[in-house]
Structures are given as structure tokens and as C-alpha cells.
Image (cartoon, rainbow, N blue to C red):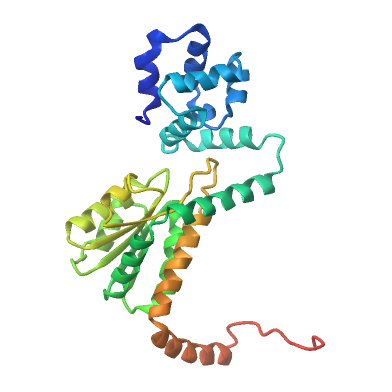
């Protein structure tokens, strides 16, 4: 079943009953809101029963309403403007505890990521980083903190880490123009996908470098331009992108690499601990009675 729900509605419009036309009209005109409505809520919005909405989804060729809803969500995730995200988030949060809603949604994304992350792809990504002397990490806009976090820890494990977080395509290409076939690139992008990151990944791959894409699917614009894809769920629609699951995958990546670089890290951190202690880099917590 194609995920292009708008085309499906258009092609089947001549077969719709009066109630189905109301559903189709609302989805077409307000797909950003319809994507996150239950069948009951959508039915109430257009003035039909919940069962009518469910039957409508089945008659369109979907397994049920959840399948049709997923198709709408997949279509809109990369189309929503920031203003639309705010509106959708407010509709979803109405009358609910924000803390519980957001944290439970993030926890669900973590559970989904555990199931969807290909362990063999993960192993190959780890090995690729271990086998190279130079790693580029690309992440712009909301993905920039993820790139910086990964770069911060990889700098302890490898002497040649380049973190690129500039969002301008011209500047990004200036940073990666020296890419070589033996290099590895970790590119990070989620909906709304950064065109600069996708184009940079495509360029690096064409230059022969190994591209590891951290994104929400192999069929995403970044996934299609990666040699190995680390999938993580990040589809909470709001002004703020949900990056809990991608960050957790990055944590796993760091831990896996660190396990193979144990001796190097031990030497580095033995020296660093002495420096940190000498220059009082960290606050020391007193034990005992707190004196």
C-alpha cells in the first residue's frame, strides 16, 4: 500500500459516500491534524461514526485505521512547518499532563528503537569507525547537539575527529572537501530532514568514503545515501524534536567503540584525572558528615 494517502483519496473520490467524502475532505485539508487523531475523534470532527472512519480505511485498502493513520503521519512528518507543529502539539496535549505525555512518548520511541535497530548494521558501523584514522560527524540544526556529543567522546578515542555542525551547504562542503575513500562519515538527520546533511552524505559516498547514517529509516533521504543505517525513532510532532532515542543509539555507539579502545582510554584518562585534580576542573564532594 502506497503511503501517498492524498493520491489515494483523489483516485478513489468518485466512489465515496457522503460520509466518506467528509472524511476525505478533512484529511486533504487538515492532514497535519488528522494524522494524530483517533478514529473516534476524527469521526466526531467531521460528523460521522467511528465505525464509518474504520470502514473507510479498510475500503481504501489499509489493514485498518491505524495503518491509514500511519500512512498520513509518514506523509506529513517532513511537511509540517514550525507553526503547524505547535498547533498539532497543542491539540494532542489538550487536557493532558504534559510531563507524562512527553516522557511516555519518548519511552515508546526507545522501545521501538530497540526493536528496529539492525544489530548487524550497528556492528559494521562500529567496526568501520575502529578501522579508520579519520571520522567526520555531520549534524546541523537540532541534530547539531547529537553530533557534538558524539564528537566529544570520540575525540578521546581517536586523534582525527572532525565535527561539522554548520548548516550552510557552502560551509559544510568546505569542511568535507578533503574527504578520502578511507574516511568514515557519521551523518545525523531526522524529520524535517536537513538538505545540507543529505547532500553532504551523498557527496562523501560518491568520493568513496563509508557513510553511517543515523536517521529514522533506511528509506529516509539520509538512509538512501548511507552505507550503514542506524535507525532510531524520532517522530514526535511538536516544536521540539524528540531526540531521546537517537541520543541513546549514540550512547550505545560510544560504549561499543570504547570497549575496543580500553587500553588507549585508560592511558588518556589516567593523565587527565591528574590534570583535572591539579587544576580543580571538577568539584569534589565531601564524604562523611559533609564537612
33 in relation to 168, above or below: above
| Viewer-nearest residue: 94 or 271 | 94
Q: Position of residue 156 (x, y in %)?
A: 41, 79
Left or right of 68 on screen, residue 52? right
Q: Residue at x 34, y 72 (%)?
A: 161
Counting from the top left corner in percent of width and height, residue 100 is at 68, 48
Can you tell which quarter of the image residue 38 is in? top right
Q: Which percent across, then down, holds residue 242?
A: 53, 50
Which residue is at 33% across, 60% downward? 121
Residue in front for this viewpoint, 8 or 178: 8
Q: Nearer the viewer, residue 163 or 238?
A: 238
Determine the residue positioned at 37% across, 53% down.
167
**Residue 181 falls in which quadrant of the image?**
bottom left
Answer above or below: position of 133 versus 224. below
Q: x, y percentage for residue 56?
A: 48, 18
Q: Quadrant of the C terminus?
A: bottom right
Amino acid at each position: 500500500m502506497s503511503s501517498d494517502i492524498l493520491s489515494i483519496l483523489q483516485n478513489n473520490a468518485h466512489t465515496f459516500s457522503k460520509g466518506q467524502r467528509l472524511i476525505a475532505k478533512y484529511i486533504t485539508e487538515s492532514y497535519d491534524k488528522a494524522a494524530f487523531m483517533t478514529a473516534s475523534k476524527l469521526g466526531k470532527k467531521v460528523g460521522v461514526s467511528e465505525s464509518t472512519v474504520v470502514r473507510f480505511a479498510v475500503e481504501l485498502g489499509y489493514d485498518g485505521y491505524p495503518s491509514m493513520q500511519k500512512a498520513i503521519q509518514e506523509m506529513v512528518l517532513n511537511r509540517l512547518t514550525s507553526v503547524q507543529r505547535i498547533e498539532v502539539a497543542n491539540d494532542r496535549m489538550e487536557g493532558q499532563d504534559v510531563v507524562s505525555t512527553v516522557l511516555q512518548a519518548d519511552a515508546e520511541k526507545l522501545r521501538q528503537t530497540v526493536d528496529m535497530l539492525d544489530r548487524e548494521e550497528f556492528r559494521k558501523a562500529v567496526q568501520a569507525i575502529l578501522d579508520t584514522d579519520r571520522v567526520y560527524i555531520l549534524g546541523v540544526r537540532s541534530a547539531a547537539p547529537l553530533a557534538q556529543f558524539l564528537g566529544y567522546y570520540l575525540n578521546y578515542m581517536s586523534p582525527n575527529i572532525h565535527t561539522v555542525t554548520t548548516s550552510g551547504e557552502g560551509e559544510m562542503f568546505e569542511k568535507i572537501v578533503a574527504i578520502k575513500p578511507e574516511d568514515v562519515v557519521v551523518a545525523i538527520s531526522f524529520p524535517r530532514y536537513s538538505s545540507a546533511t543529505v547532500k553532504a552524505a551523498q557527496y562523501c559516498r560518491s568520493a568513496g568514503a563509508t557513510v553511517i547514517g543515523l536517521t529514522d529509516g533506511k528509506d529516509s533521504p539520509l538512509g538512501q545515501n548511507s552505507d550503514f543505517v542506524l535507525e532510531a525513532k524520532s517522530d514526535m510532532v511538536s516544536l521540539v524534536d524528540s531526540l531521546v532515542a537517537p541520543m541513546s543509539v549514540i550512547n550505545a555507539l560510544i560504549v561499543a567503540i570504547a570497549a575496543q579502545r580500553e587500553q588507549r582510554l585508560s592511558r588518556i584518562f589516567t593523565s587527565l584525572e591528574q590534570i583535572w585534580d591539579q587544576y580543580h576542573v571538577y568539584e569534589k564532594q565531601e564524604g562523611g558528615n559533609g564537612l
